[in-house]
Image: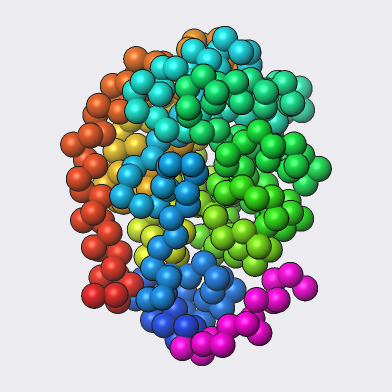
Amino acid sequence: MMYIRHRPRCASKIRVQARNETVADNVNPHWNGQFSCFDLVAKTIARPRTIVQVGDIAIGGDEFVVMAGPCAVESERQVLDTAESVASAGARILRGGAYKPRSSPYSFQGLGLEGLKILSKARDLTGLAIITEVMSETDVEVVAEYADIMQVGARSMENFSLLERLGTCGRPVLLKRGMTATLEDLLRSAQLIVASGNRDVILCERGIRTFETATRNTFDVAAVPVLKTVCHLPVIVDPSHAAGVRSLVPVLARAGVVVGADGLLVEVHPQPDKAASDGEQSLTFAQFDSMMLDLEPYLSLRSNADRLYAAAGGFD
Ligand code: PEP
Ligand code: MN
């Protein structure tokens, strides 16, 4: 039983859990008593933060890490042009789906292996690391061969056999919050990956489904401080899927920075109007450039957010 195997090794269990309960309780008493379900990812004095290292990129440390690129890999030209442009604007990681989880079975499903090869070529040419989605256990091996970070999409957050398999994939995992998942649900899924052998997990808030229809999803900005207070894993935000329209992406990105996110996942396309998927929420190259410039003055506020989490968690 994978998910209980770690427990016998936890000699200081009682002290650690007591500490965790205090952290959770300081955020919201409702969390108290639930924490044993995600003790491996819970923030403690002994483990206040995890830095996920991807080559020379440290996610969860002092650097604000931007991951940008198209929703889907469509062609070599599209990916190479985007990679070059986002790299020169300051992105460190190139995103792009080769396997696409689409709401309609009749929409573009991605280029598969050919898409992975295009991403890998873009890495060779630009030095950007690659993040791409893995949808199925059977694709884990091939995606891990080409990707630097394995993205688990919102629709797969509770694909438990996939999460368990990612425990031994040898690559960091970016775990997106499910559309109707609570933060507890998200942390339980993260716990499963860690309990299955992989400590390098990054959490991603990408908006949740609510009664609001003005935006594609409702950006839960409170998710960042809650997760950063109770959990030691890095937290990034995806303003593109939260907003659903490109005009709102830069301001939601700003919000992510000031609440202390560790980075961003943003969709950028050379010709958003012609994109095979998520064109309405994709930034043009020029819009991405100006968003990166706009964020600069806010970056110094991230350390203040860190201090607030420490206080909320009873660490100072
Ligand atoms: C994506 O990143 O393109 C994607 C499909 O995101 P999500 O899983 O958050 O819908
Ligand atoms: Mn998308």
Could one spot residue 213 in this view of the protein?
no
Q: Residue 252's quadrant in the figure?
A: top left
Residue beneath the point at 73% across and 43% down: 140
Q: Is residue 311 or residue 34 the one in the foreground?
A: 311
The image quadrant where one finds the N terminus is bottom right
Q: Residue 152's quadrant in the figure?
A: top right
Residue beneath the point at 54% across and 74% down: 39
Q: Is residue 98 or residue 258 the one in the foreground?
A: 98
Q: Position of residue 61 (x, y in %)?
A: 36, 52
Report how many numbered discs are placed on residues in the image: 0
The image quadrant where one finds the C terminus is bottom left
Q: Position of residue 64 (x, y in %)?
A: 34, 42
Residue 65 colored in magenta in the image: no
User: Is residue 286 placed above or below 34 in the rendered structure?
Assistant: above
Query: Magenta: predominant secondary structure element?
Result: helix
Q: Which residue is the extreme one toward the right?
A: 138
With 64 as the anchor, is 145 left or right in this view?
A: right
Residue beneath the point at 56% across and 87% down: 11
Residue 13 colored in magenta in the image: yes
Could one spot residue 128 in this view of the protein?
yes
User: Is residue 222 placed above or below 68 in the rendered structure?
Assistant: below
Q: Position of residue 211 (x, y in %)?
A: 50, 45
Q: Position of residue 134 (x, y in %)?
A: 68, 40
User: Is residue 143 placed above or below 273 in the rendered structure?
Assistant: below
With 162 as the anchor, is 175 left or right in this view?
A: left
Highlighted range, magenta: 1-15
Residue beneath the point at 20% across and 45% down: 300
With 290 as the anchor, is 191 left or right in this view?
A: right
Q: Is residue 61 or residue 300 the one in the foreground?
A: 61
